[in-house]
Structures are given as structure tokens and as C-alpha cells.
Image (cartoon, rainbow, N blue to C red):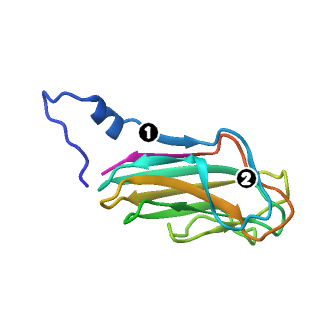
Amino acid sequence: MAVKQWNVGDVLTASDMNTWTVPLAGVKSAIQTIQSQTTLINDADMRFAVTANALYEFHAFVRYSSGTGQDWKSSFTVPAGASAHFARYANDSGGTFGGNGDFADTDTPVSQGAGVGNVRTINFFGWLSVGGTAGNLIFQWAQNTSGAFNTSLYANSYLTGRRIG
């Protein structure tokens, strides 16, 4: 998964530009609200396509609200044979701010809910190593504990990435 090297006289193609210089992005187009949903859902907007046998870095900026005690959980789904690791910068379910965890795509960290309409933010930073199967990196989210209060993911939350190998 080496980074492409150009030589003097090489012509940059549209494919080269799109593969190596254009950021990938999935931006939440509108607020989405769920109730009594504890199974992670694949977000329809916060996703982007990835190439087989490639390495990506990614960042997600998430604005959410969730009922106190219901809290919020989130993770990422990756293509078959791929793996991802990320750090989450946010309050955990107990209200303690943290950012030193090393989570894998199989982990589901929980963040604190502060009551409906009280917006919280989470930042995720990580890498994705794609094996022989191309696919999508997709942000997932749900309530941690089922409840009647709305849990919302706000418009303009986003997932960005770029190929680094």
C-alpha cells in the first residue's frame, strides 16, 4: 500500500487526482431522529467508497442529542476483510471526557446523552486498511438504552477521509 510516486514528465490523470488529492466526504443532509432504536443503523449520508488494497485516514465530526440515561452509541462498518482503528474524543457515558482509547471497527463506544435538544459533539480520528474487497466506510449510530425520548443526528455532521497508501 505504498503512496504513488510521480516522476518528472509523468502526466497526472483525472484518476490520479481523484485517488490521491480529492478528499472523500459524506455529509449529513438533514437532521435524523430515532426512538427506541438500540441496533446500530448504517447512516445513509455519512459514508464514502474505498478501493481494495488501500489505506485511508478518516475523521468524523458528529453533532447529536440523546435523552439523559439513553445515551448514544456509534461505530463504523467496513468492507469484508478490512479493519479500522479509531480514537473517540467525547464524554463517555459517565460524563468523563476522553480521547485516549483505541477502538476497532468491532467496538461500539458509548457517549453521554445530555437530554433531548442539548447538542453534544464527538470527533473520531482513525485509519482504515482495506483488504481485497472494495466497499464503503459507513458511520453507524443508535441509542445505547431504548427510550421514548428522541435521539438525533444533526445536519452537517460529516465523515471525511483520504487515501494515504
Residue shown at 15% from the left, 30% from the top: 10
Are there few (<14), some (14-19), or many (20+) residues within 10 Å of tag 2?
Answer: many
If the image is split into quadrants, where does the N terminus sit? bottom left
Q: Is residue 162 magenta?
A: yes
For the residue labelled by badge 2, is the local secondary structure a helix, a strand or a loop? Answer: strand
Residue with the mark numbered 2: 64
Q: What element does badge 1 sit on?
A: loop
Q: Position of residue 20 (x, y in %)?
A: 33, 40
- Which of 95 and 12 lies nearest the eye of the viewer? 12
Above or below 141: residue 27: above
Nearer the observer, 130 or 114:
130
For residue 102, side relative to residue 27 (left or right): left
Give the magenta part as a residue range. 159-165
Label 1 Cα neighbours within 10 Å, binned few <14 / some 14-19 / many ≥20 = few
Q: Which residue is mark 1?
A: 23
Whether residue 139 is in magenta: the answer is no
Q: Amino acid at mark 1?
A: Pro
Please provide percent x and percent y for residue 163.
36, 47
